[in-house]
Image (cartoon, helix red, strand yellow):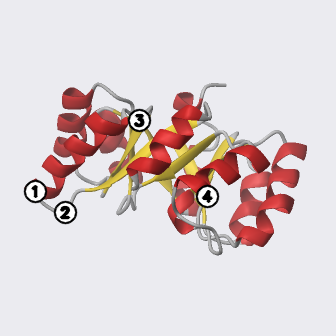
Amino acid sequence: MDIHCQKIIPAMKTMKDFEKFLNSRYMYGVLLEIHISQLKSVFHYAGQHGKKLIVHVDLIQGLSHDEHGAEYLCQEFRPHGLISTRGNVIIKAKQKKVLAIQRVFLLDSHALEKSYQLIEKTEPDCIEVIPGAMPHIIREVKERTNKPIYAGGFIRTVDDVERALEAGAVSVTTSNKDLWKHYEGH
């Protein structure tokens, strides 16, 4: 299964979220807000359950959020991918041949233009647009970058998910377990 075939990519903030993910049909998930000391066991259990993890580098507690932290994650745990707002992390992920997902926070037009400059520099494999509840911006970023788009942030309903997907997002990253459950069979 290709990650882009999964409409929802569960984003896990707690170990309870991780357990729900392990017992779900989803193959791919995003690790958020985890302590570095938990990574070994989390990756072990994910492997036992045939799950592939994407690590949000900026949210790993106890880890440097730079290219050195990214290199450590890639060498020690071989994640499916890395997400970061930081260009040097994305470049390192690409060097290590893991999925490189550039996260961009689109607060206003200036932030959007700065994000385009960063994307041009880092050439990520995919882009995570935050907030993802802006279909017209998803469409614009997809057209301008020609990269797969993940929508995240403020996606609260099935309608929000569907609008993001219709606008061109390949998947929605969410910690909303009601949405996980709704899309699990799709």
Q: Earlier in the sequence, mark 1 or mark 4?
A: 4
Which picture quadrant has residue 119?
top left
Q: Which residue is mark 4?
A: 69
Question: From the viewer's perspective, is 31 left or right of 39?
Answer: left
Q: Looking at the image, which residue is at 19% across and 44% down? A: 137
Q: Looking at the image, which residue is at 78% across and 62% down? A: 19
Locate the C terminus by quadrant: top right
- Would residue 62 be visible to someone looking at this image? yes
Question: From the viewer's perspective, is 171 left or right of 117?
Answer: right
Q: Secondary structure at mark 3?
A: loop
Identity of the amino acid at label 1?
His
Q: Earlier in the sequence, mark 4 or mark 3?
A: 4
Q: CA distance from mark 4 to mark 2?
A: 27 Å
- The reply to whether discs 4 and 3 touch (Cβ–Cβ < 8 Å) is no
Q: Nearer the viewer, residue 12 or 71?
A: 71
Q: Which residue is mark 3?
A: 124
Identity of the amino acid at label 2?
Leu
Q: Which residue is mark 1?
A: 110
Q: Earlier in the sequence, mark 1 or mark 3?
A: 1
